[in-house]
Each structure stands twice: as C-alpha cells, then as structure tokens.
Image (cartoon, helix red, strand yellow):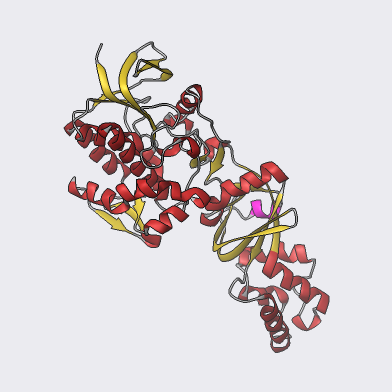
Amino acid sequence: MNIYDIAVVGAGPAGCMAAIEGARLGKKVILLEKNDRIGRKLLLTGNGRCNLTNTSTLEIFMEAFGRRGSFYRDAFGKFSNHNLMDFFKEHNLELKVEENRRVFPITDKAESVMNVLRKVLEECKVKVVYNYHLEHLNKVANIFKLSSTDNEVIKSRSVVIATGGVTYGFTGSTGDGLRVAEFMGHHISELLPGEVPLYVREKWVHQLKGVTLEDVGLSIGYGGKMISLPTGNLLLTHFGVSGPVILDASHEIVDIINKQGDVKLYIDFKPGINHESLGAQLMEDFQNYSKKSLKNYLKIHLPNSTIPPLLMILNIDPQKKLNQISKKERVKLLHILKALPLTITGHLPMDKAMVTCGGVTKKEINPQTMESKLVDGLYFAGEIIAGCGLRGGYNLQQAFSTGYLAGNSAGTK
C-alpha cells in the first residue's frame, strides 16, 4: 500500500492550500474530500462573490479574532493577505478592493477562485479523492491510518485536518474532523454559531421585515452590565434582527444568552449626539415647531416605517401637536430615541450560521506550525480551530493562512 507524506482531509480553502504547499515542497500529497467537488462552502461566501481577504494590517487581522487573535500571528505573518492576493494574481485571477477593504475576485464569482485552486492542485500533482467520508483515524509506528465509511484505507506520515465546523451541513461540514480530533485526545470547545441572525420577542419588529435602520448605535444589556457595539446598520427581519454589527457580535451574544437567558438590545437612533444635547434639541424644536404634529416631527429623527410602532410604544396620539406634549412624554420620547429596548430571545439554528465558533482548542495547537501538541505529525487548519473572526474576509484569510502554515510545516518536518 502507498504511504503518502501528507494526507489532507477536507478540500475547502484551508485544505487546498495545505495540499498545494505540501506538494510544492516535493511531498507526496493526497487530498480527501467528502463531496464530489472541492470548495462547496467556499462557493457560498460573499453571496457567491467570495470575499477572499481584507487589505487591513496584521494588527487589525489579529483584533478581528478577539482575545486570542495573537494565536494567528505566525500564520498571518508567513502567509499574509498580500501573499494570498499575489497567489491568485500569479494564476491570472485579478482582484478588486471594495468598501471596508474587502477583497473580491474581479469576476465577482467564487467559482473563479475555485478554478484557480483546482488548476494549481492539478499542476502540483496532488491526488484528489472525492466522496471520501472519514470515519476513523489512528497512528501506529509513526504512520497514520485513515479509514472511510466505505473502508477505504489511506496511510500517511502526516495528516492535516481541515474539515471545517458544523455550519452549512449540506456542504459536508458535519463535524467529522471534530469527532476524529476528539478521538485523538483533543478537547473541543463549545460549538457556537457565528455570524448568525437573532430572534427578538417584539412583534412590531417582525412586521417591519426588510427595513434597515441605518447608522444606529447598539448596545447589549444583561445582569446589570452594558456592552457597547459599533455603530452600523440594523436589519429588521420576520423573526428578529440581523445586519453587519449583529452578525459580527452574534457569537458573543449567543454565549451570553446561553448563560444568562434573554438579553436586551438597545437601539440609539441618534448616536452622534449625547442624551443631554438631544434633550435640549427636543425642547427647542417643540417650541419652534409647536403647531406640528408629533408624527410629522418624528420624520426628522426616524425612518417613516418605524414611527407608528414607536408611537404605540410611547402611547401618544400621532396627531398631537408638539405644544400639547407634556414634559413626561417628551422625556419618554428622548429615552426611546436614545435607547429603544428590544428583547433578544435566541438565534437561528447552527446550520443557518455562517461560521462555527468553537472547535479544537488553541491551547493544544502549536501556533508556529499548526501541529498538534498532543499528536506528532497531526495538523489543524481553518474553521476546525476554535474561535471565529469578524466578517469582511478575515475568516477566509485565516483558512488560507493556517492551511499554508500546516502544509509548509508538514512538508518541511
């Protein structure tokens, strides 16, 4: 039986890059993919456009992965966003930079990215085996033995597991690699959905599905604590809320919900002005526009679609003139404009999340090589590693960078 130098499990961006780098170093590499083609999940990213990476600095990349973002210093340093962009340009795929430094293929098609990876795998003579469902992995006398559900056995001196998390299960990300890693002695941190929309209790929100509240301030309240989120757009849906800020913070919010129960989301419609200044402005406006109805006046501060439900919350007649509004009612309006409360009750299911936050704990992975600290010759790359980054190309860059580092480390050992 052939013994490969490197067996890579999972042909997403991390697995493809690991296989390519290992083969470039002259190693005999086999790439095992659960589906009948590579990169099924990659084809869904960026609404099919594939937000490959971001042109931000190394420091910003590490910040994008939270408290333990420095774990990726070596991976991002050895295969940076600029290295990744050069890789695709060298293979005749032009790129473009859009808002918030996000990088896309000039074609706006994720398939273009997959075509490059497919072509380079072929050029590097990586053997790709499709429809391989990994069931078991063990190691005997420095040789790994990988067994599929069809009893197809592969032997290799090194193994890179790049099977992703448990989101978008229909693409093959069903946790196979996590089960194998656990069998090999690794601890798996709690699997939480990342970049996932949230449920809210208030029915009026559901009735405004599709409405975007632009540039609002947001904060989360629970157990007497308050966490401020970045200012951004909030999308109202038929079940709750979504949008860039919510998606980026969702894994932290989900963690809080799991521990604390329901939490409050406060919307600040006027984040550019503090509470006292807005209060003074309302007093002045109520004098200057005394004959204007409250409903018409609120168009200055709120999207039209939100005015009726908020007036119901305030319990004030929409046709009431500003000079008829009591001080108590004006103060209540001020509080609503600066901190409208919604109740977050949960999140969409894991298979509706964009990424998995959780996986093989970083403490058991050498950040300089992506090699397991528990099993010599076993490497991890991509989403299977615990934690997740912000939207905007950071997670895909993590996959390519950790894949490169794992393939390079296995190929030079």
Q: Which of these two is toward me, 216 or 177?
A: 177
Decide if residue 113 is on the left or right side of residue 384: left
Tell me which residue sits at (40%, 20%) in the image.
133
Give the quarter of the image for residue 231: bottom right
Instruction: List x then y, in percent, for residue 356.
Output: 50, 39
- Residue at 73%, 70% (x, y): give it: 335
Start-end of magenta stretch: 203-207
Residue 23 relative to residue 252: left or right? left
In the rendered image, the vertical position of residue 353 relative to residue 344, given as above or below: above
- Above or below — where is 203 with respect to 146? below
Quick check: can you spot residue 119? Answer: no
Where is residue 83? Give x, y as percent: 26, 50
> Where is 119 relative to 262, above or below?
above
Q: Residue at x 65, y 76 (%)?
A: 274
Q: Position of residue 357 (x, y in %)?
A: 52, 41
Q: Quadrant of residue 275?
A: bottom right
Q: Would you say the magenta stretch is mainly helix, strand or loop? A: helix
